[in-house]
Image: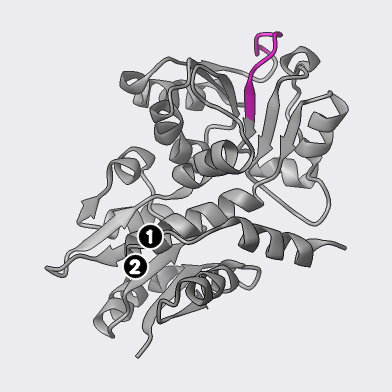
Amino acid sequence: MSARYAVFGNPIAHSKSPQIHAAFAAQTGEPIEYGARCIDAERFEAEVKAFFAGGGKGLNITVPFKQRAWAMAAQHSPAASRAGAVNTLYQDAQGVLCGDNTDGVGLVCDLQDNNGVSLKGARVLMLGAGGAVRGVLEPFLAAGTAEIVIANRTVERADELAQLFADLGRLSSSGFEAIEARPFDVIVNGTSASLQGDLPPLPEQIVAAHTACYDMMYGAAPTPFCAWAQAQGAGKVIDGLGMLVEQAAESFRIWRGIKPETRSVIAEIRAQLAP
């Protein structure tokens, strides 16, 4: 009998997670089935409880429920504790609901393992100060970054994040216009508004030939941020498809105890995106 897993979100029709986990199951021989469910906002907690009560083994949680999943979990991984958000739920042997956040691990894996971008000693610029950026700061700092600058339209939100993670490494905050005009090693875009072409005003001098620019978003065509980075002459320009697959692989490892190979899955989905 197959173990049941699912992703809960709203909207959910666009989700690639069922396809990704089906590929992982085929590759590893793990007997799982994985579905996608669109959950009404007022029903989220009840649906999570019903899923596990009915024998479900694990859930991925996506927008807009990650903070509510965090509140439901009785135990949090260090990454989830820091992120204030959970994208992976499961029950331990005692039936306790446990929450993890694999977004940051997924991004670090995609940068370092798939794209050869080292974070050790790197000067990093994070664009945005919402949940997407908060979710990846702890793994970035653990990878040995020299400095992370969090830039946001509302500087106060960037200040809050920098203070929240200050015990883990060197962080500072800035408004977009006040970003220091010298090259960074890595620039990560965590602003969702950029998908609508609403790019923050950024100094051209922050990008050099050695700079790796990473957008957490992805699409069939280069995202507006990726197009901007290419125009500035960035050495590497990477979208977030690899992060999506890598965070799924880490969830799969947590649930099944085996880490699937990801590159073939990334390539498979990339081929489907091609216009």
What label sits on residue 71 in the rendered view?
none
The answer to whether any part of residue 64 appears in the image is no
Q: Which residue is mark 2?
A: 256
Side (left or right) of 142 relative to 222 = left
Predominant secondary structure, magenta span? loop
In the rendered image of this protein, does residue 200 appear above or below residue 84?
above
Nearer-the-camera pick, 262 or 125:
262
Left or right, residue 269 beside residue 6:
right
Quarter occupied by residue 224 = top right
Q: Which residues are magenta?
A: 178-187
Q: Residue at x 78, y 19 (%)?
A: 209
Residue that appears at 70% across and 8% down: 182
Provide the residue designation for mark 1.
Answer: 253
Amino acid type at image mark 1 = Arg
Q: Are marks 1 and 2 in contact (CB under 8 Å)?
A: yes
Please state which of residues 36 and 130 is positioned toward the viewer in this rendering: 36
Work out whether residue 51 or residue 46 is closer to the camera in this orientation and state it.
51
